[in-house]
């Protein structure tokens, strides 16, 4: 398909500058503790030298709503905490630029699916740049990863973990003895959630209801590519496992995304990778909470999507948008209220005024307190309170207080004053 080639060579977005607190004489940050869904516990994540991170990217329609932004912000904080600890980060993020929901949206609106994907991906890049979210090292579309998917499916075929139903290929989830260990869902929970999130439990010919599609043969009117598996397109979960294994290697440090991906998506992609490599896919599975809108799920059909681009177009400072998001702990489910942006703006104005002081409270203590809050499962709300207290503290013991605060906010929280 010639036109699909235009999706090749996906660009990432430009990186914000992250000042080094170590170079400013503050040493390195603490070991980072992060909540791992698979063990249901806080885990120290202190990889030697380099951390390898995979975060599930957007399906490019309806980008970028505040839920998306909150999820990518959570992993941005994680990277900043690792960087401050002196750990390099190797980061991959996908774009699900061919999948049922995208094709359905394109059909429903009469748009070409490639144009829709490109438009929304570009909007997402602009939003991420405005919000100072650190870009991935590899930003990869499903279409450009088809070769990787085919390789992984073939590996799984050799392991006897893939079978055909008509011309489609399914992964046998029971080929992985650890299947179920990411979500720890009961059989009933799995059965309930699987069909709600793209699964097809009742298709005749499947070995097990939960087995998932890894390769889908061409359907009339849908895009397809010629490969050694036949003409078709990749299943969803294997898109992420194949990219993570290829770009980051086995046993990555963190697999991340929103909590809607715990099952089946992260369960399935982990099992596929585990059968192929014989190793645990990720050391930690980290999930951001779901963001709703004034008591409801955000969705286009309800007409209540809150888009970052809309807030920007309404001339809200991106740093105020970022601050409004940071006011919520990444792990909690929360609701956006239109009045929230005013809170972010007020705080931004107060902090901007506070960094205009010639002398203030101890900058060293500020850095230590912020580091402690963020290393403790990325506790941004506590970090914001620490800065609020610093801003109203009238002591004048440190002439570099404001300069230090400016740097620490930029480095650890991505807030440029
Ligand atoms: N392309 C797949 C992942 S491979 C996907 O889930 N795309 S998405 O566009 O639906 O979501 C992009 C990211 O935002 C995912 O990590 C998802 O978990 C997260 N996300 C989606 N909706 C919300 C929400 N309401 N609140 C918080 N995070 C969300
Ligand atoms: Zn994914």
Image: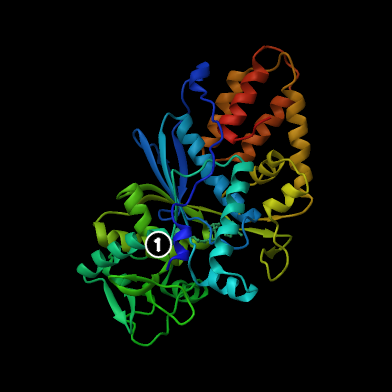
Q: Residue furthest front?
A: 2
Question: Residue drawn at (48%, 73%), measured in percent from left and top?
Answer: 198
Question: Residue drawn at (62%, 55%), measured in percent from left and top?
Answer: 64
Percent from the top left, x then y, of residue 395? 73, 16
Question: Residue drawn at (76%, 42%), measured in percent from left and top?
Answer: 343
Looking at the image, is 416 positioned above or below residue 320?
Answer: above
User: In this view of the protein, can residue 271 be seen by the observer?
Assistant: no
Percent from the top left, x then y, of residue 164? 30, 80
Quarter of the picture containing the N terminus is bottom left
Snapshot quadrant of residue 186: bottom left
362 vs 356, nearest the viewer: 356
Looking at the image, is 140 positioned above or below residue 208?
Answer: above
Label 1 beta carbon less than 8 Å to ligand 2:
yes
Percent from the top left, x then y, of residue 160? 22, 71
Label 1: which secondary element: helix
Percent from the top left, x then y, of residue 379? 57, 40
Indicate left or right for 393 with 403 as reference.
Answer: right
Quarter of the picture containing the C terminus is top right
Q: Residues within 10 Å of mark 1 (few under 14, many from 20)?
A: many
What colour scheme has been applied to the protein in the rendered image? rainbow
Instruction: Report the residue marked by disc 1.
Output: 239
User: In this view of the protein, can residue 389 be seen by the observer?
Assistant: yes
350 vs 320, nearest the viewer: 320
Question: Residue drawn at (79%, 50%), measured in percent from left and top?
Answer: 339
Indicate left or right for 172 with 131 as reference.
Answer: left
Q: Quadrant of ligand 2?
A: bottom left
Indicate left or right for 283 with 375 as reference.
Answer: left
């Amino acid at each position: 398909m010639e036109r699909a080639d235009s999706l090749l060579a996906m660009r990432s977005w430009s990186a914000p500058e992250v000042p080094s607190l170590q170079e400013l004489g503050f040493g390195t940050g603490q070991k980072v503790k992060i909540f791992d869904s698979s063990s249901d516990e806080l885990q120290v994540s202190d990889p030697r030298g380099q951390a390898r991170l995979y975060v599930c990217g957007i399906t490019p329609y309806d980008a970028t709503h505040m839920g998306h932004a909150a999820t990518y912000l959570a992993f941005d904080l994680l990277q900043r905490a690792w960087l401050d600890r002196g750990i390099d980060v190797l980061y991959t993020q996908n774009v699900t630029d061919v999948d049922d929901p995208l094709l359905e949206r394109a059909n429903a609106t009469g748009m070409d699916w490639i144009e829709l994907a490109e438009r929304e991906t570009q909007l997402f890049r602009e939003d991420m740049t405005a919000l100072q979210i650190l870009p991935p090292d590899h930003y990869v579309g499903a279409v450009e990863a088809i070769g990787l998917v085919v390789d992984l499916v073939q590996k799984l075929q050799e392991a006897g973990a893939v079978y055909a139903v008509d011309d489609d290929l399914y992964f046998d989830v029971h080929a992985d003895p650890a299947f179920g260990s990411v979500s720890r869902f009961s059989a009933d929970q799995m059965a309930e959630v699987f069909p709600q999130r793209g699964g097809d439990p009742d298709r005749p010919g499947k070995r097990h209801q939960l087995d998932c599609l890894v390769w889908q043969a061409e359907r009339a009117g849908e895009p397809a590519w010629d490969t050694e598996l036949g003409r078709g397109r990749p299943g969803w979960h294997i898109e992420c496992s194949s990219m993570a294994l290829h770009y980051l290697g086995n046993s990555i440090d963190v697999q991340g995304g929103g909590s809607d991906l715990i099952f089946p998506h992260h369960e399935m992609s982990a099992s596929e990778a585990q059968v192929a490599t014989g190793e645990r896919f990720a050391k930690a599975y980290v999930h951001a909470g779901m963001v709703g809108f004034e008591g409801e799920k955000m969705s286009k059909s309800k007409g209540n999507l809150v888009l970052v681009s809309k807030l920007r177009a309404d001339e809200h400072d991106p740093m105020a948008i970022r601050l409004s998001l940071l006011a919520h702990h990444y792990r909690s489910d929360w609701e956006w209220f239109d009045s929230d942006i005013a809170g972010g703006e007020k705080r931004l104005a107060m902090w901007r005024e506070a960094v205009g002081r010639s002398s203030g409270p101890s900058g060293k203590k500020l850095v230590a307190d912020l580091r402690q809050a963020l290393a403790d499962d990325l506790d941004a709300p506590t970090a914001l309170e620490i800065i609020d207290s610093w801003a109203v503290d009238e002591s004048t013991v440190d002439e570099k207080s404001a300069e230090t605060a400016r740097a620490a906010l930029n480095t650890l929280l991505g807030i440029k004053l």
